[in-house]
């Protein structure tokens, strides 16, 4: 795996990669071309997840995942999430989401 991808996963959080890869991948063109769409997506995600104390943390998560996607490393990142310890813990649903989306990407 590209070391940048590993760093991006760490910055985004493996749970975030599992939970939001499909949404960001599907909306990549709008995110890249419509700043208001990206801002609204970050705000909505910040409010939905409740994991970050400030919106800057969610912005970092989104930008890190976007870096993975635009580099073409999403399949590797999803495999990392699927094979992580997270797949056995409280965030196991995110690992299942990663598997489902990987199956769609590699079909």
Image: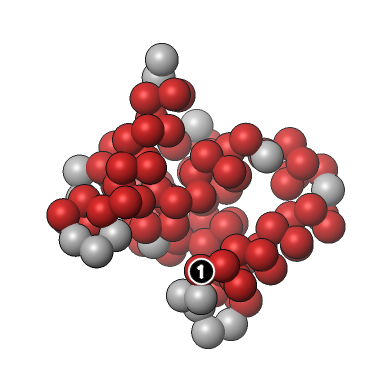
Residue 104 appears at what percent x and percent y?
Answer: 44, 24
> Is residue 33 found left or right of 63 in the rendered image?
right
Q: Quadrant of the N terminus?
A: top left
The residue that mark 1 highlights is: 49
Q: Residue furthest top?
A: 107
Residue displayed at 38% across by 42% down: 97
- Regarding residue 94, the answer to whether it shows in the image is yes
Q: Is residue 60 visible?
A: no
Q: Tell me which residue sits at (20%, 43%) in the image.
A: 83
- The answer to whether 63 appears left or right of 18 in the picture is right
Element at badge 1?
Answer: helix
Screen quadrant of the C terminus: top left
Q: Which residue is most to the bottom? A: 53
- Splitting the image into 4 quarters, where does residue 78 fall? top left
Q: Residue 8: where, in percent of width, then height? A: 43, 55
Along the line of sight, the residue nearer the viewer: 2 or 103 = 103
The answer to whether residue 53 is above or below residue 92 is below
Residue 31: x and y in percent read 73, 46
Q: Is residue 1 left or right of residue 42?
A: left
Image vertical order of residue 96 relative to residue 47, above or below: above
Quarter of image, res 102: top left
Residue 75 position within the rendered picture, expressed as x and y whole percent measured from the top left: 39, 32
């Amino acid at each position: 795996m590209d070391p940048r991808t590993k760093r991006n996963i760490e910055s985004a959080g493996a749970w975030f990669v599992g939970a939001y890869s499909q949404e960001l991948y599907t909306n990549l063109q709008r995110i890249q071309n419509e700043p208001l769409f990206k801002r609204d997506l970050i705000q909505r995600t910040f409010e939905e997840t409740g994991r970050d104390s400030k919106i800057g943390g969610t912005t970092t998560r989104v930008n890190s995942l976007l870096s993975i996607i635009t580099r073409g490393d999403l399949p590797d990142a999803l495999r990392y999430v699927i094979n992580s310890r997270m797949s056995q813990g409280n965030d196991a649903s995110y690992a299942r989401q990663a598997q489902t989306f990987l199956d769609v990407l590699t079909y």
